[in-house]
Amino acid sequence: MAGISAGTSVLARRPRRRQRAGRRASRYAARQALRLLVIVFTAGPFVWILLASLEGPQAIFRSRIGLSGMSLANYRGAFTAIDVSRYLLNTAIVSVGSALIAVGLGVLAGYGLARFRIIGDRWLLLAIVATQLFPGLLLTIPLYLILRDFGLIDSLLGLILVYTVFSLPFAVWMMRNYFRSIPGELTDAGLVDGCSLLGVLWRVILPISVPAIIACSAFCLVLAWDDFLYASTFLISNSHYTVSVGLYSLMSQYGTNWGVLLAGTVLATLPVIAAFMAVQGRLTNLLSGGMKG
């Protein structure tokens, strides 16, 4: 009788196992379908722009874009119509420059706010976050007047300072929160070993903060790279244009060469995609390692 009851219980557990396996398979399929939907939703527009940039001007407005008849004529036209290389260089200068300044100051300010008790630090953090609530258009005229008084209109340096102003609050907030997650014992151990406060930051804190620094730098870089409002307002000379302003110059009241415009858009987007792909693996490994390093 014991053997019969044991065999019966085994047979009873098999359907439940199959049901659990079926539920796991359905959840896995749902997750994969959701991931595919997100990929299509995010990458679909760029793929369409890429394919359309390889088509002729009349083929762009067809209901579907095929793979036949594609050429690089629009890309050659982009380099002929505007100085794409100059605009990309200007964009890289202002983006990288503002990111370096914002992240550097954000690291110092975030470390101070995380490790030291400051009177009114909560109100200070609230004020830092509140600066992100102001619409960019509202600050255009005050920033223009300030840059004019310092002779920085139509200057890449002035644009770098403007982007730094908007990136710095996020950098301070992000780095402060990350530094607060690091155990204070590491700072105390560095001080016991004879390091100064800046020495602890340089030798102990920064090496394990590389993931946060990379993420913060990426945000600041993209913020400056994608801007059009301030670049079109504060830059006058064609030689100082960023890529977004240069692409806008392709649009006129007499018509727009959409093939050339789309090709320029692809050229402006590829450096950002390449930068993210270059740091993606390193960032993922560092984040997965956590505090082990």
Image (cartoon, rainbow, N blue to C red):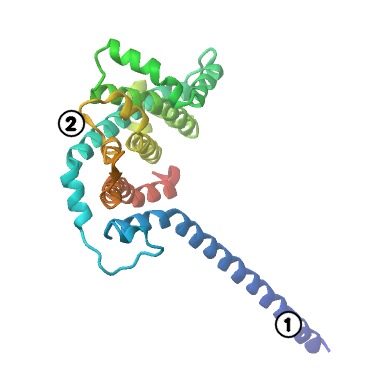
Report the amino acid beneath label 1.
Val
**Residue occupying the point 31% across, 22% down:** 161
- The image quarter in which residue 163 lies: top left
Left or right: where 17 falls relative to 176: right
Where disc 1 sits, the SS reads helix
Which residue is situated farthest in the top direction here?
149
Q: CA distance from mark 2 to mark 1?
A: 79 Å
> Which badge, 2 or 1, comes first in the chain's sequence?
1
Which residue position is annotated with label 2? 239
- The image quarter in which residue 227 lies: top left
Report the front residue among 290 and 238: 238
From this view, report whether residue 256 is shown above or below residue 107: below
Residue 293, visible in the rendered structure: yes
Residue 194, visible in the rendered structure: no
The percent position of residue 221, horizontal first and vertical second, equals: 33, 36
**Residue occupying the point 39% across, 65% down:** 64
**Which quadrant: the N terminus?**
bottom right
Where disc 2 sits, the SS reads helix
Which residue position is annotated with label 1? 10
From this view, report whether residue 42 is shown above or below residue 24: above
Q: How many residues crowd around disc 2 within 10 Å: few (fewer than 14), some, or many (20 or more)?
A: few
The percent position of residue 41, horizontal first and vertical second, equals: 47, 56
Which residue is situated farthest in the left direction here?
80
